[in-house]
Amino acid sequence: MILTTARNFDMSTFAKKRDIVVSVFIMIISAGIFYSAVDFPMGAEVFPKFLASSTFLLSMIMLINTIRVYSKIRLTEEVIERQPEEEEKHSILPLVVFAITFVYVALIPIIGFFTISFLFIITIMRLLKVKGIKYYLITLFILIGGIYFLFVMQLNIPVPQGFLI
């Protein structure tokens, strides 16, 4: 249903401001990471610079899309109605994911990288309401198996081990 109420328009204005602030914040962080990687030894700076550049580029795309999409909404002043409880769920989800990620990073040295990563992936997928065990198994196999193969077997980089694994 399409509405032109001031309340819903204010919510879209809030979402626009939030998206703009987040994308600019990520662009600033990416630029800082890129700048700090300049001092890395020759060859070691390539990967951090690549990640920072990629993140900066994706944030810039997000900023452009946000401005483009919300300018169309502003011109027509039409907003798709959302149920208030659905809006509240979506607004708290990033905070919940951030909190879970913070706990995940804090528990890596205690529990072990692979064990806590396994639990983290399952928790996030359940939070995002992924249905079907095959999606869980495929995701876990690709992520955990890929990280193990690349970092432990190929690059011989040790991962943090805790009391479990």
Image: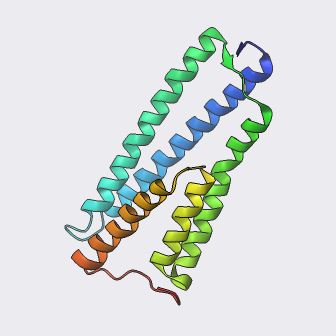
Q: Residue furthest left?
A: 42
Q: Residue furthest top?
A: 76
Rendered residue at 60%/16% (across/down)? 73
Residue 4 against residue 22 in the figure, above or below: above
Q: Residue furthest front?
A: 133
Whether residue 146 can be seen here: yes
Foreground residue, 149 or 31?
149
Q: Is residue 21 left or right of residue 154?
A: right
Residue 92 against residue 17 in the figure, above or below: below
Q: How many marks?
A: 0
- Residue 140 at what x, y percent from top left? 43, 64
Rendered residue at 79%/22% (across/down)? 7
Rendered residue at 60%/56% (across/down)? 126
Q: Is residue 7 left or right of residue 15?
A: right
Whether residue 155 can be seen here: no
Q: Residue furthest bottom?
A: 163
- Residue 25 at what x, y percent from top left? 53, 46
Q: Quadrant of the N terminus?
A: top right
Foreground residue, 143 or 138?
138
